[in-house]
Image: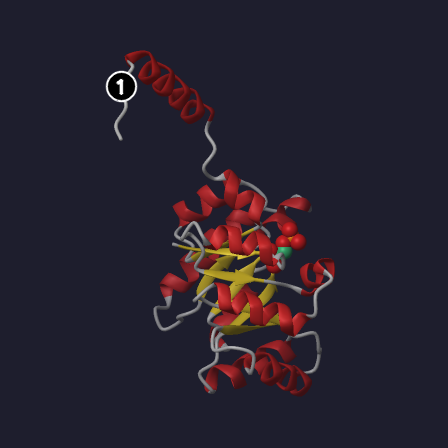
Amino acid sequence: MKFFVDSADSEAIQELAATGMVDGVTTNPSLVAKSGRDFKELVAEICDMVDGPVSAEVTAIESEAMLKEADELLAIADNVCIKVPLTWDGLKATRALADKGKMVNVTLCFSANQALLAAKAGAAFISPFVGRLDDIGADGMGLIADIRQIYDNYPELETEILVASVRSPEHMRASALIGADVATLPPDVLKSLISHPLTDKGLDAFLADWQKSGQSIA
Ligand code: G3P
């Protein structure tokens, strides 16, 4: 399973990349706006930090204009993945980019049928937003399970399921159990995956006992 970082905070991405856990990065217009950074400079910086796909989202809403923006973004680095919204124009742009061998991440997916359309358009990734579905009382992880089953029913669909809008370690656990291909995690959620109070307690006890033994290894 691949771990992406969902962030436009280059320092946080760098810190996590150093752990060897980061297979890619996703950004979106809201995260970029929050960072206050120049979009293209930021994407170039992130693309240098990680070898895997770095999703950069177009903001045009009409397919021709999306493709123009995609050209600009693709010129930044070889690992740029173009992110487009799940609209007919987005799917049209997806097909055009996929036909040129470019990676596309189709975002703002909230239904299994939308995921099916994105796969038929040739998307490299589909991004279902589990947290936002949970927010409105729907079943975010249920959608991931549905998409997994649908894609498995049709092996010719090669789109990877990229679980997005991940809010908690439980979303991660459930994604892995279902067999999602990728999860994109905000830095704080990724960091929290390691936490368990019994690990901390156990380590404290080991270290205290070791100190009492008076020994040292190196
Ligand atoms: O990058 C898209 C997605 O992960 C957004 O998450 O928390 O804004 O719903 P959130």
Q: Quadrant of residue 28?
A: bottom right
> What quarter of the picture does the C terminus occupy?
top left
Which residue is at 64% across, 80% downward? Answer: 89
Which residue is at 61% across, 63% downward? Answer: 27
Above or below residue 45? Residue 13 is above
Residue closest to the eye, 94 or 144: 94
Would you say residue 18 is visible in this rendering? yes
Ligand 1 lies in which image quarter?
bottom right
In the rendered image, residue 21, in percent from the top left (x then y), is placed at: 42, 52
Above or below residue 111? Residue 137 is above
Which residue is at 37% across, 63% downward? Answer: 153
> What quarter of the picture does the N terminus occupy?
bottom left
In the rendered image, residue 15, in percent from the top left (x then y), is placed at: 52, 51
Q: Element under label 1?
A: loop
In the image as oriented, which residue stretches furthest toward the top? 212
- Is residue 116 toward the left or the right of residue 149 in the image? right
Residue closest to the eye, 176 or 102: 102
Q: Which residue is mark 1?
A: 215
The three-letter code of the residue at mark 1 reads: Gln
In the rendered image, residue 196, in percent from the top left (x then y), is placed at: 46, 29
Is disc 1 surrounded by few (<14), some (14 to 19) or many (20+) residues within 10 Å? few
